[in-house]
Amino acid sequence: METLNFEFAAGLPARGRTLVGCVSSGDLEVLVEPNVAGTLSIQVLTSVNGSAARWEHLFTRLFEGRTPAAMSIRIHDFGATPGVVRLRLEQGFEEIGHD
C-alpha cells in the first residue's frame, strides 16, 4: 500500500460532497468534499506501489486548461485502470455540480 499526495491550484470551494465507486475487484472509491478557496488537494491510497508518476500524469491531464473547484479528493484504489479513475472522478464532479 502506498499513500500519494498531490496539490493543484483551484477556484472557489466546491458546493457539495459525494462518494462514488467502491473498493472491490479492480475499482476504486472517490470521496469529494469542499476545500479552502484556491486549493485542490488529492490523497490517493493505492494497492499499486510505484505508481506516483501515473497518477500525477492523470491529474495533470484532467485539470489542464481548467480551473477546478477547490476540493479535497480522497481516492482508495484497488488497481483501477486510468480510464476507470477518470470515469469516477468525472462522476464525482458531476454529482457535486462541477465539470
Image (spheres, rainbow, N blue to C red):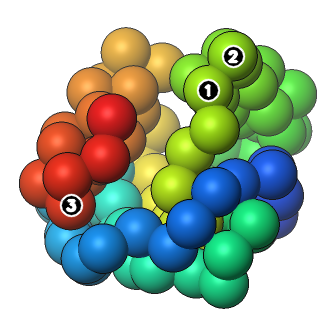
- How many numbered dots are placed on residues in this image? 3
- Name the spot of residue 9 as percent of width and height, x first: 81, 52
Mark 3 surroundings within 10 Å by alpha-carbon count, few (fewer than 14), some (14 through 19), many (20 or more): some
| Circle 3 residue | 96
**Distance of mark 2 from mark 3, alpha carbons?**
20 Å
Q: Residue at x 27, y 27 (%)?
A: 87
Position above or below: 55 against 14 = above
Name which of mark 2 and mark 3 comes first in the sequence: 2
Q: Residue at x 75, y 25 (%)?
A: 60
Residue 66 is tagged as 1
Q: Which residue, as the protein is rendered here, is positioned at the far front?
A: 12
- Name the spot of residue 2 as percent of width and height, x first: 75, 62
Q: What amino acid type is highlighted by mark number 3?
A: Ile
Q: Name the quadrant containing residue 19.
A: bottom left
Q: Nearer the viewer, residue 9 or 57?
A: 9
Screen quadrant of the N terminus: bottom right
Q: What amino acid type is highlighted by mark number 2?
A: Gly
**Distance of mark 2 from mark 1, alpha carbons?**
4 Å
Residue 80 is tagged as none
Q: Relative to 15, is 78 on the left or the right?
A: right
Q: Residue at x 18, y 43 (%)?
A: 94
Q: Relative to 15, is 1 on the left or the right?
A: right
Q: What amino acid type is highlighted by mark number 1?
A: Arg
| Circle 2 residue | 65
Position above or below: 28 against 80 = below
Q: Residue at x 21, y 61 (%)?
A: 96
Q: Relative to 65, is 15 on the left or the right?
A: left
Name which of mark 3 and mark 1 comes first in the sequence: 1
Q: Is residue 58 visible?
A: no
Q: Secondary structure at mark 3?
A: helix
Q: Secondary structure at mark 2?
A: loop
**Distance of mark 3 from mark 1, alpha carbons?**
17 Å
